[in-house]
Amino acid sequence: MNKTLTFNELQKECSKIIKNEKIRINICAGLGCVAKGSLELYDEFKKVLKEKNLDTSIDVLLKEEKKEGVNTIKTGCIGICEAGPVILITPGDILYLHVQNKHVREIIDKTILNNELVEEILPKNYDGAVCKNIKEVPFYAKQEKIVLRNCGQIDPTDIRDYIAHNGYTALYKSLFELSPEEVINIMIDSKLRGRGGGGFPTGLKWKFAAAEKDSKKYVVINADEGDPGAFMDRSVLEGDPHSVIEGAAIAAYAIGANEGYIYVRAEYPLAVERLQLAIQQAEKYNILGENIFGSNFSFHLKIKEGAGAFVCGEETALLASIEGFRGMPKPKPPFPAQKGLWGHPTIINNVETMACVAPIINNGADWFKKFGTPESPGTKTFALSGKLKNTGLVEIPFGVTLRELVFDIGGGIKDDGKFKAVQIGGPSGGCLTEEHLDMPIDYDSIKKAGAIVGSGGLVVLDDKTCMVETARFFMSFTQAESCGKCVPCREGTNRMLEILNRIVSGEGTLEDIDLLEEIGFVVKEGSLCGLGKTAPNPVLSTLKYFKEEYLAHIEEKTCPARQCKKLEYYYIDPDKCKGCTICAKQCPSRAIFGIPKEPFFISQERCVKCGICITVCPFGAIELK
Amino acid sequence: MDYITINNKNVPITGEEKNLLEVIKKVGIEIPTFCYHSELSVYGACRMCLVEDDKGNLMTACSTKPRPGMKINTHSAKVIKIRKTIIELLLANYHQDCTTCGKSGHCKLQSLANSLGVDKIRFKPRKEYEELDRSSLAIVRNPNKCILCGDCVRMCSEVQGIGALGFVHRGPKVSVAPALEKNIADVECVNCGQCVAVCPTGAIIVNDNTQDVWEALNNPEKVVIAQIAPAVRVSIGEEFGVPEGENSLYKSVAALKLMGFDKVFDTAFTADLTVVEETYEFLERLEKGERLPQFTSCCPGWVTYAEKNCPDLLPNLSSCKSPQQMFGSLAKKYYAKELGITPDKLVVVSIMPCTAKKFEAKREEFKTNGEYDVDFVLTTVELARMIKEMGINFNELEPESLDMPFGFFTGAGVIFASSGGVAEAALRLAAEKITGTTFDAIDFYDVRGLKGIKEAAITIGETTVKVAVVSGLGNAQKIIEKVRKNEVQYDLIEVMACPGGCVGGGGQPVPNDMETRKKRAEAIYKIDATMPLKKSQDNPAIVEIYRKWLDQPNSEKAHHALHTNYIHRKRISGMEISDETTENIKKLEVSICVGTNCYLKGSYDLMQKLIALAEEKNMTELLEFKGTFCMENCAHGPSVKIGIDNHKYGVQKDEAEVFFNDVIIPKIKSLNKTTSV
Amino acid sequence: MTTKRIDLTPIKNFFAEHPGLKRNNLIMILQKVQELYGYLPEEVIDFISEEIKVPKAKIYGVATFYSQFRLEPQGKYVINICNGTACHVKGAPSLVDEVEGILGIKSGQTTPDGLFTLETVNCIGACGLAPAVVINDKIYGKVTPEKIAELVNQLKAGEK
């Protein structure tokens, strides 16, 4: 296949490749499943299918004509990371969990050849019943996949699979059936809001850039996903890179740009690899480069790698980094849409936002608005983590309540813990508590509650999690990643961290709470960029909802969740201690004293809280208070 | 008529205003700022200039353009709280020793802390105390006092085009440092001190030599004389509340006498001398059409810059010393004798607007019999400090006149203080020499003014002299590029490292912004206008100097006392790598005379060729090339000495390879007692 | 602080293969240098500064801003001495002194021959084995100054 084919011809060729595919086995090759052996699983499937002469994968078809058979592919993240290795069999949407090599033959004989299910590896409902297809699985029941529409269902390393599944039709439509203004109007109409965390109307941003009179404009995709625990963008880049490329090309057409950059963080080498391959393949088929599909429109997309700086996720810092400078933000205005890369109009959109563009163009703004809420239409991906039974990657329409997300989809708190709070928005976000469980998840409701949707990182906390320590952890992250340019963020977050460190060590005072709020206010209002402005959020949010925990740390020098090690102390119960001297001999700091055969005691000044004494005590006489 | 509302007052705007700060100024309010500087790019980091609009949005006044209809409150509760907290957070890091800090009284952090009423600091320093960088003769860096406003970084980068300072690390570890965190003296720095001019705190200050001078003044065995630079007289008054632009020369003389100086002279005198020497040199080059364009050489910042960055242009620099050094040279070589003392008993102190002069004074080539020609350099602010130390009430002083013979000067000497002054002074002499007649209309307005690059084509009789006047090293680089590419034809180029010329030197009182420099320059030209003599050639004291000591302009005696040569300096020292593995290898020193005679015979080219040969043969670790001053082997030059051997080789530049193979290599071998290299 | 003469050939070749590199390629260039040399040597920074006409202070500023870049090479053996509370109490500082003495470097530095890097780290969670030392992912427990001297000297001997 070469680039002199028209798009129609190209589509026909690509569909030929999967025309013999009666059944497709999608094997998740996301990080979690790979760690559990999904690549070996793939090899096993291919081996057995070949044995049985059922293999109709693309590479096989190139060598011989085949009757109908089975296509096996390695896909992007299917989402239910707790339960890997995961496979999805289509049609039928049969989901199998914890799949091992030993299950392969059974799956082929039963499911592939006889339409029967292998119950052992089917997902189970909360009341124990098996789920015959993915829609029955509670984790998936309330999800709607727009951004992740192809993740888990196509081969991200082969553009032909993307094209065979309706790929690049939106770009074609834009170039030949819509004017740039019409494209922008559809985007504005759809009310799509930036998924990177800002929530700014995407169509409006494109409109501003389109209005600028400059022959050079740029499209930049922000793939610098830096929130700890967030991997939504990574999954999209690894699992469906073409959706992002297509969105970028449409954006470029809309605003009048011919060059684009995708800025990927250094810590995502696989994503970079996938993108490189995807861009190469797109260029080969004339979908990127000069005169796309034979039109007048040209668009060149290049990859720029980050080098390890969270702050480069901020728009102006990102642009500075592309230009070869330290990633330090600049005051806005001027906004990038007016003066961006090298002074030219530039739009910067998040990976997820870009992935929404093609379906919106293809299906229309009204279709998009059917999902979500009037002010927050569409869906949002979330990376669920923390004390949940079902952690992983999900995509829900806005409007789903927090309760549904945590309990129906997430399966509730694991290890019989009790729900305490949800930290949403990462180091820029705040917490939502029990009182918010029935609140719908959308931009405005969450903002009203004092938090932000952010990029989609969501950590579920139970009663054994210390909120003060959580705030301190996020603040230490922010401090380390602050660029250091403006005084409020550089100095203010440093001092706030200083105070929080004191509090979790039992050296806090009541004035510290006022000081935290005072400094927090200045950092929030005075900082130059989003990192600084949102840095105090975790602290201010936990102070609002969990002040009693702060007070316990300060006044009683205890940690109610028993997480802060410095506030715990080891105690020998004199009633149980037999004076056997084992603990004293093992203690690395010689903190245990006593007369043999009499109850011993621990000197808190010398104790380093390593916990060895509890482990070695044969009588269970030592406890952690 | 468009307008915006500031604190409920309507202010009309033209649309030309750069930012809200300018508009707010019209209302009579100065918003506090640290990192904003009108001549540098907007940085937006200190956040002090935040103002609030009617919707509760905050914006930095330095970066926001006024839009019609805006409603701004410059002092809402929110922004006041933020400003005070910012100051408190800054003060917490090693800023609590105002009483003993050299910048006390001139520090923006100090004055803002006062005016904003910051009365408590609830935090202790959060970083380890860092040692001061005292490597440079011109400036001292104190990273502990740095508030990271970035003004020095942007000044050195954007205006001077050098970029010797930059931000390093990230977050709480951020600091401002030279490349690789080396000492400032070891990198591209040319000592211009413009960083000092913009630093709001005591993080970069002038290297203080006042103690040295006090010691000399109090030493009964020494005769201490002073020379005052032209720019000082119109700026020192600022330190005593005198309005900008007043001529405080004669009060300064009185002060210096009170302090114990035996004689007080004027650098404008030797400026006149420089005019004569340099113009004669220039006219000779013009006639021969060689080594043009001629670059002036009285600015030490520019000279160091040229040595580090433009070795190809060193032959074009005037060989004249600067007025400061000409003074010192004459003082030690001739004047001491007149006083009846040996040169080591004479202490020459110069009062300069300039920090680079401190580096210049300590150049090894500026010595007489092992003594530095200029012993100490005091900047304007240092002199002011000494005056205050003595408790002198400057404004009450009775003016005193300068001493003779070095106290007589013309307007041409005084205008050296302003960008364009040297060129104009030279033209005043050139005009007469070319036409052979004297005339009075000698104001060359085209070269005046504070613009960074000025051009003028002056027609004198049948000759047209094309002059360029540059101030600010960034501008110098622009012109140099054009000259190299032959895009422009100039005969004479005056280069001053400091924007506006010496009136804006690194040692001048702060504020040292363009407004102030403009006023100082205007005062200089006013002095010139009122002087009875405006041409250097008319200075009777100068005529006498030639008669007594120097014979005539560009004579051999004049060359010996008043001219010099330049050396190609590496921009970052330490890059020549002294490997520990090569510790056992002894380097052979090859000294090549770059005195004028040898130079004109091609010794500089010879040196370049030898260096290139060493590189080619991979022997750079085994050799050390030095340019030295007159070996007094002029007839046989270019002269070369090897190692400690006193024998002087006469080597023509086309004999370089033969000399290298036949003389240098065997010497290397014998030095290292080896038969192979 | 290395005596190894830095060979500029790899980076020179890279520039020859990619003509027209400018400031906006700086991060990519530095990443390549780190790939070729393991860290960013001074001499290479010098070379790049000349090639793309960016002052050295600015290049250094970029290199120190991003976490990825190392300005010092790491030794072949990375010696991590745990300085968590338990280890500290049990004498970790004297272990640090001992190693500093043997190798002639301070904590945080690498020996000139490129063999050893000495670092102190906060609690690796092996308090029962205090004082603990990790050398290239191998944990040693209850280490005395004599023991660590033995370990280091053994490694040194093995390299001769």
Image (cartoon, coloured by chain):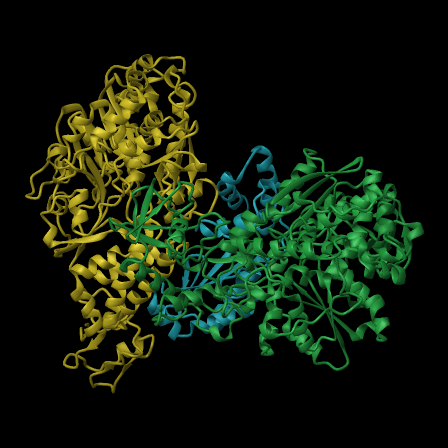
- Coordinates of residue A164 in the picture (x, y in percent): 28, 20
Chain shaded cyan? C
Q: Is residue A377 left or right of residue C145?
A: left
Above/below status of B416 relative to A148: below
Chain shaded green? B
Who is closer to the viewer here, A366 or B480?
Answer: B480
Q: Is residue A49 left or right of residue B627?
A: left
Which quadrant holds residue B235?
Answer: bottom right
Chain shaded yellow? A
Who is closer to the viewer here, B488 or A14?
Answer: B488
- Coordinates of residue A402 in the picture (x, y in percent): 13, 46
Above/below status of B676 relative to B265: above
**Which part of the image, by quadrant, shows the N terminus of chain C?**
bottom right
- Coordinates of residue A519 in the picture (x, y in percent): 29, 62
**Residue sitting at x 42%, y 57%:** B33
Q: Is residue C15 left or right of residue A603?
A: right
Which quadrant holds residue B140?
Answer: bottom right
